[in-house]
Image (tube, rainbow, N blue to C red):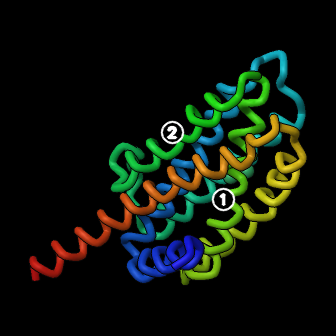
Amino acid sequence: MDSETRLEDFLAVVASDPALELEWIDLLSQLEYVGCRKIVKGVGFEAVSLEVIRHVAEEASHALLLKSVAEASGLPPRSWREGRFSAAGWRYFQGLDRGLCALLGDPGLHYPAVSWAVEERVLRLYAACLRVTRNESLKRVLRTILAQEERHGASFGAASFPEGFRDAARGLEGALWREFIDEIAHDVKRGSLFSRNAR
Ligand SMILES: [Fe+2]
Ligand SMILES: [Fe+2]
């Protein structure tokens, strides 16, 4: 089974359980927020441009839109620390950030490199979420977010990196992403076994 099919299967399981989907939407909001923080921390004060500010604002708005959908759909206000998949999300992003930065000598490339890798992932992920979810508010929000992610993706896709970097980065990101999804899928499977045994 290819990884896109596996992802859609996983997302279909998530979309079939409203409580689980709320956890998932809240996790996406967390990832957007962490992405936003990485930009703020990764770009030096002297290098902040109109485009950087726009990028920060749009990623913050993605976190806001997703958190708003989660709470409007029934998730109680809470810390991300209480999220069922919060730790897995944190590990994915930290691993990606550290791993990609370690591949590059020039610190000036850290921001475009991490942004490029994240955009490659979210474009496929959000398109797949849009295909499977039945939550109409989430669909609306995903369409808005996707339009902005496409612009970000095109902009960082045009950045120039050292030879071989993109392939190495795709390998690293792909491995971290599989670990992330496997960890969540394992937790979901264990949870459904527990609830079946409890009946
Ligand atoms: Fe985003
Ligand atoms: Fe983005």
Q: Are marks 1 and 2 in contact (CB under 8 Å)?
A: no
Q: Nearer the viewer, mark 1 or mark 2?
A: 2
Which residue shows up at 62% across the image and 74% down it?
Answer: 128
Amino acid type, callout 2: Gly
Q: In the image, is residue 126 above or below residue 118? A: below
**Callout 1: SS:** helix
Q: Quadrant of the C terminus?
A: bottom left
Q: Nearer the viewer, residue 17 or 197?
A: 197
Pointer 1 residue: 122
Q: In the image, is residue 94 above or below residue 64? A: above
The x and y percentages for residue 80 are 41, 46
**Callout 2: SS:** helix
Pointer 2 residue: 95
The x and y percentages for residue 21 are 44, 70
Disc 1 beta carbon < 8 A from ligand 1? yes
- In space, the residues marked 1 and 2 are separated at their CA atoms by 16 Å
How dense is the environment of label 2, judged by Cα within 10 Å: few (below 14), some, or many (20 and up)?
some
Q: Nearer the viewer, residue 99 or 86?
A: 99
Residue farthest toward the left in the current orientation of the protein:
198
Amino acid type, callout 1: Val
Q: In the image, is residue 11 above or below residue 170? A: below
Specify which label sits upstream in the sequence, 1 or 2. 2
How dense is the environment of label 1, judged by Cα within 10 Å: few (below 14), some, or many (20 and up)?
some
Which residue shows up at 82% across the image and 41% down it?
Answer: 54
